[in-house]
Amino acid sequence: MIVLSLIVPFPITGAYVDANRSIKLFVFGDSYVDTGNRDSTARSWKEPYGITYPRIPAGHFSDGQVFTEYIASRMGIKSPTPYRFRKLRPIKYGMNFAYGGTGVFDTLVAAPNITKQIDLFEQLVQEKIYTTDDLKFSTALVSASGNDYGIYLARGGSLEGLPAFIVSVVNQLGSDLQRIHDLGVPRVAIMGIQPLGCLPQFTKEYSYEKCNSTGNLVALFHNLLLTTMVEELKPESKFVVLLMYDAFISAMKKFENETGDFPIFM
Ligand SMILES: *[C@@H]1O[C@H](CO)[C@@H](O)[C@H](O)[C@H]1NC(C)=O
Ligand SMILES: *[C@@H]1O[C@H](CO)[C@@H](O)[C@H](O)[C@H]1NC(C)=O
Ligand SMILES: *[C@@H]1O[C@H](CO)[C@@H](O)[C@H](O)[C@H]1NC(C)=O
């Protein structure tokens, strides 16, 4: 919670005037924010996912809460209903269109990429499920936390080709953010990438004791381009980048300081 208050750089609480009409959160992206859109064959519906919160597997790719739930809670609203449950649960807190394992471009997971997720949102706006008025005090949270790069490497893409690929991911992401904004969501927060080289798949080569510097450089380059791109989008609008890289490093540093374990720095 303390970390979040540092990294959410604009006030997102108490913005609504009509008591009957809640402020809303619309969520797009991957497993860092998905709260149950993948079907029951996905790992997120099996233990150990969900065992800390909500104590049974519930379609979140975490044993506890995912980022959506922290953000919704700081906005003072309930976590928005996953798109898959839109006919069963309240939609007044917004909606979650994120699918774990997906990316800006298609990945190996057969679920909607971010473009397609925005199509689903657009459809609800066209059907007036959410009116312009409903969207007036809404915020979007977008997570593109590296599946595109994981798939790029898994498909045998070269390290030399990575910078150009990162540019294409960030450019596509820029159009996605602009599109969400143009559909009527005034504030759009995009999560930067966490230190990718500290994910278990990369630390395995160092017996989980050190991060892979190439992975972290990919994340840093992505974040640099993302920040530059967001600044150029529309200076008068409320686009923000959430500094996930710094938040992860600060949490890891704290852990290292407290335990003497995991000297992560390269
Ligand atoms: C997203 O998925 C759709 C298929 O559902 C595909 O046609 C489109 O090219 C994809 N978009 C990107 C940016 O990869
Ligand atoms: C990091 O990971 C990449 C991709 O798996 C690998 O090519 C590289 O050798 C690893 N180590 C370093 C120090 O970059
Ligand atoms: C490191 O840990 C010590 C004692 O556990 C604490 O006093 C200090 O503030 C910590 N430093 C950082 C940078 O977290």
Image (tube, rainbow, N blue to C red):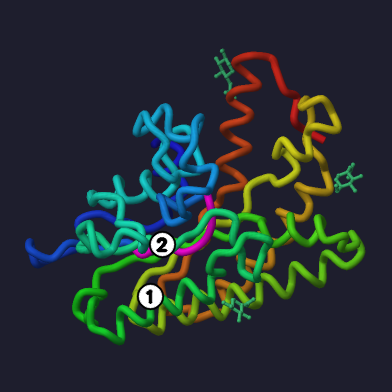
Q: Residue furthest bottom?
A: 126
- In which of the image's four quarters is ligand 3 placed? top right
In x, y percent, where is residue 88?
Answer: 23, 58
Which is more foreground, mark 2 or mark 1?
Answer: 1
- Which quadrant holds residue 107? bottom right
At a point 53% along the width and 70% down the height, the residue shown is 114
Query: Of the residues shown, which amino acid type is indicated by label 1?
Result: Phe
Badge 2: residue crowd in 10 Å (few <14, some 14–19, many ≥20): many
SS category of the residue bearing label 1: helix
In the rendered structure, the answer to whether residue 146 lies left or right of residue 31 reads right
| Residue at 45% across, 79% down | 119
Residue type at numbered disc 2: Val
Magenta-drawn segment:
26-31
The quadrant of the picture occupied by the C terminus is top right
Q: Is residue 23 visible?
A: no
Secondary structure of the residue carrying tag 2 is strand
Residue 87 percent location from the top left of the image = 24, 64
For mark 2, what is the residue?
A: 27
Asked if the residue at tag 1 contacts the one at tag 2, i.e. Cβ–Cβ closer than 8 Å, the answer is no
Q: Which residue is mark 1?
A: 121
| Mark 1 nearby-residue class (10 Å; few <14, some 14–19, many ≥20) | many
When the figure is inspected, residue 54 is found, relative to residue 244, above or below; the finding is above
Q: Relative to the observer, which residue lies in front, 252 or 11?
A: 252
Residue 201 falls in which quadrant of the image?
top right
